[in-house]
Amino acid sequence: MGVMAQAEFDETIRIEADIDPEGELEYITRSFDTQIKTWANDYVELQVSLQIKANKQEDIDETLRAVKEISFKGNASRRSVNTTFWESRNCNMNRNKIHLNTGETVVLKKFNVKHTLYIPKTIDLSIDAKYADFEIEDIAGEAEFKIYNGKLYCKSIGGKTILDMRYSKAYMETIPEAEIKLYDSDIEFSKCGNFNIESKYSKVEIEIAGDMQFESYDDKYIIGLLGVVEGTAKYTEFDFGPTTSLTIEFYDSDLNCTTTGNVKAKSKYSGIVVESAGEVVVDVSYDDLYKFSSVSSIAIRESKYTEYALAKVNGDISLSGYDDQLRVESMSGDFNHIDINNKYGDFMLNLPENIAYRLLVDMKYGTIDYPSANLERKTYIKENSQTFMDAATPGYDSKQGRLIEIKGYDNKVVIVQ
């Protein structure tokens, strides 16, 4: 039996153009992995490494003709290159049927293509890619990445970065500022400055970051150090290290944070666990858990079916709600006002010893357990299931503050001192 001869090509084609050191380059590719390297030259060079085999030399020649039509468009201040040299491609085992941009159709038995792009370090870079992986050295300019079903390995970027990813992964070192949009993608950064992010079904891991604005849906965030955090989330998990402050609107989401400043929150079906915080304001809460090891003060404006577990409160407490639970394991003597207005609530306050305060209760039904031996009973009225009490510790002076007011319906109140 005779052996059919086959044609082969295994070489690198070089395509180049001049570019300004502060110019812009747009790079478009489909299906080709690319290494991007920097150099000191004042031009860009694309190296296309081809390994192709075919039964007919004509198919090789026609493929090379299509590849050689790739060129850098524009001028030195703004260049663009599109590396896709076919209109359609059908791959089945060792048969690649390709309809080229030249209008011809070729059949290749082997079709391997790899790109290496050399650029000046200082240019701004824009990438639009599908089904391709990238390795990029440090660049000093700005960058914009639009990646679909690919991987991005990048070192430091000197300027603002725009990242738009779907079904992709990115591993980057240092970015000074970023705009990020993710869909079913994962990113890992070593360090990022201030950034805005919109994400869905994604995972975000950053060691150190600046201020963060977010809009999240069914994501996972792990960030070591953050500045000011502000955003909305549904079905998302957040794991933060120290932050400057938190402004959040959650639906069925969970947050774990070490330390932060002031907290402002709206939430439903969510869990917020923080080690220490400054002033905490909960505008609206429904069926949530708020757990703090330490807070300066807490104001809960509208709440329903929520549990508040506070290990230590250093200042004032206010709560207006329905069927809530509030546990304060340790109150500082520095508070001025504790104001609770609730129905069907369950509350426990642990006051420090030897502090002067006034206790004012106006409640229908319910029970109150308080350190009566420490108080001088001034007024106590119980009539038709209505309880009214106005009492104070010996030597209480209204100028000292420390007023505890409890109003509501069918509450269970325990005050320990």
Image (tube, rainbow, N blue to C red):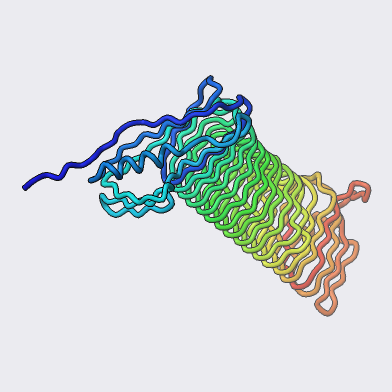
Relative to residue 406, is residue 244 drawn left or right?
left
Is residue 389 among what the camera can see?
Answer: yes
Is residue 352 among what the camera can see?
Answer: no
Q: Position of residue 37 (x, y in %)?
A: 48, 28
Q: Is residue 328 above or below residue 260?
A: below
Q: Position of residue 224 (x, y in %)?
A: 58, 39
Q: Nearer the viewer, residue 123 or 88?
A: 88
**Could you say which quadrant of the image residue 34 lies in?**
top left
Q: Is residue 69 above or below residue 97?
A: above
Which residue appears at 51% of the width and 46% of the height? Answer: 147
Which residue appears at 48% of the width and 40% of the height? Answer: 152
Q: Nearer the viewer, residue 383 or 222?
A: 222
Which residue appears at 67% of the width and 67% of the height? Answer: 305
Q: Nearer the viewer, residue 325 or 34?
A: 34
**Could you say which quadrant of the image residue 302 lies in?**
bottom right
Furthest-bottom residue in view?
384
Relative to residue 91, is residue 276 drawn left or right?
right
Q: Position of residue 303 (x, y in %)?
A: 73, 64
Q: Position of residue 359 (x, y in %)?
A: 84, 58
Which residue appears at 25% of the width and 45% of the height? Answer: 56
